[in-house]
Image (cartoon, rainbow, N blue to C red):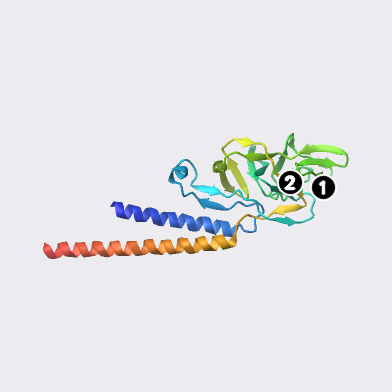
Amino acid sequence: MSSVISSIASYLSRDVESLDVIGQNVANMRTAGYRTERLKTDFRAATAGSDRALSMLDGDLDKTGASLDLAIQGQGFFVVDVNGQERLTRNGQFHLNEDKQLVDAMGRTVMGESGPITLDSAAVQIGADGAIKDGEKNVDTLRIVGIADANGLREIGDGLYAYSGTTNDWNGTLHQGALERSNVDPGTEMVRLMEVTRHAQSVQRAIQAYDAAMQSGVSHLGDNA
């Protein structure tokens, strides 16, 4: 494959992936706690791991009034147990299962500093630091981890993220009775869609021009044979 064709194919592949990222962002606009994804523009950073980066900007808050709806502000994540593995999430739409353990919307165990959290009822007070009180009883503190390197985060579906980096202290605020919206900006996604579409069209024209030049060259060689 010539270097020209290889370059064109690379650009087109990048555009296709960009469209996939934009589509994923738009599809998750109403997913609580969803982090906007972008393709990395730094080639060296992209080759060091995932070529996608997550926006760590806070989403707006929706007040729900439900005592077990929780929203994080600041660069922290809730920790949930998924088949014995710890995964991170910003979606704080929690409830109690039949064993009165605190779980997320998909039934995965939400972790506290002492492990799984068991509550007598949903009528608890949860402080800005994640401390849980049932009346005068201190139950536990939600485990919320800070992220030292956002490049170590990888979206794995269902509002979950795997993390391969180190954690640090979380210095944000927890809001009880609220959910964090996704941080997807529809206007930004529309602009990105138009930019990528125009670039893909330019690449397509380059392919057509290269094909025409090759055809002309082949015909010229045939005429001189």
| Front one among 204 and 148 | 148
Q: Farthest residue toward the right?
A: 136
Which mark sits nearer the N-terminus, 1 or 2? Answer: 1
Residue 133: where, in percent of width, then height?
A: 83, 41
Residue 115: where, in percent of width, then height?
A: 73, 35
The disc labelled 2 sits on which kind of residue?
Leu
Horizontal relation, residue 11 to residue 192: left or right: left
Does residue 30 appear in the picture of this structure?
yes
Q: According to the image, label 1 marks what residue?
A: 122
Horizontal relation, residue 98 to residue 147: left or right: right
Horizontal relation, residue 67 to residue 215: left or right: right
Say what secondary structure mark 2 lies in.
Answer: strand
Horizontal relation, residue 49 to residue 95: left or right: left
- The quarter of the picture where residue 24 lies is bottom right
Badge 1 crowding class, 10 Å Cα cut-off, few under 14, some 14 to 19, many 20 or more, is some
Badge 2 crowding class, 10 Å Cα cut-off, few under 14, some 14 to 19, many 20 or more, is many
The disc labelled 1 sits on which kind of residue?
Ala
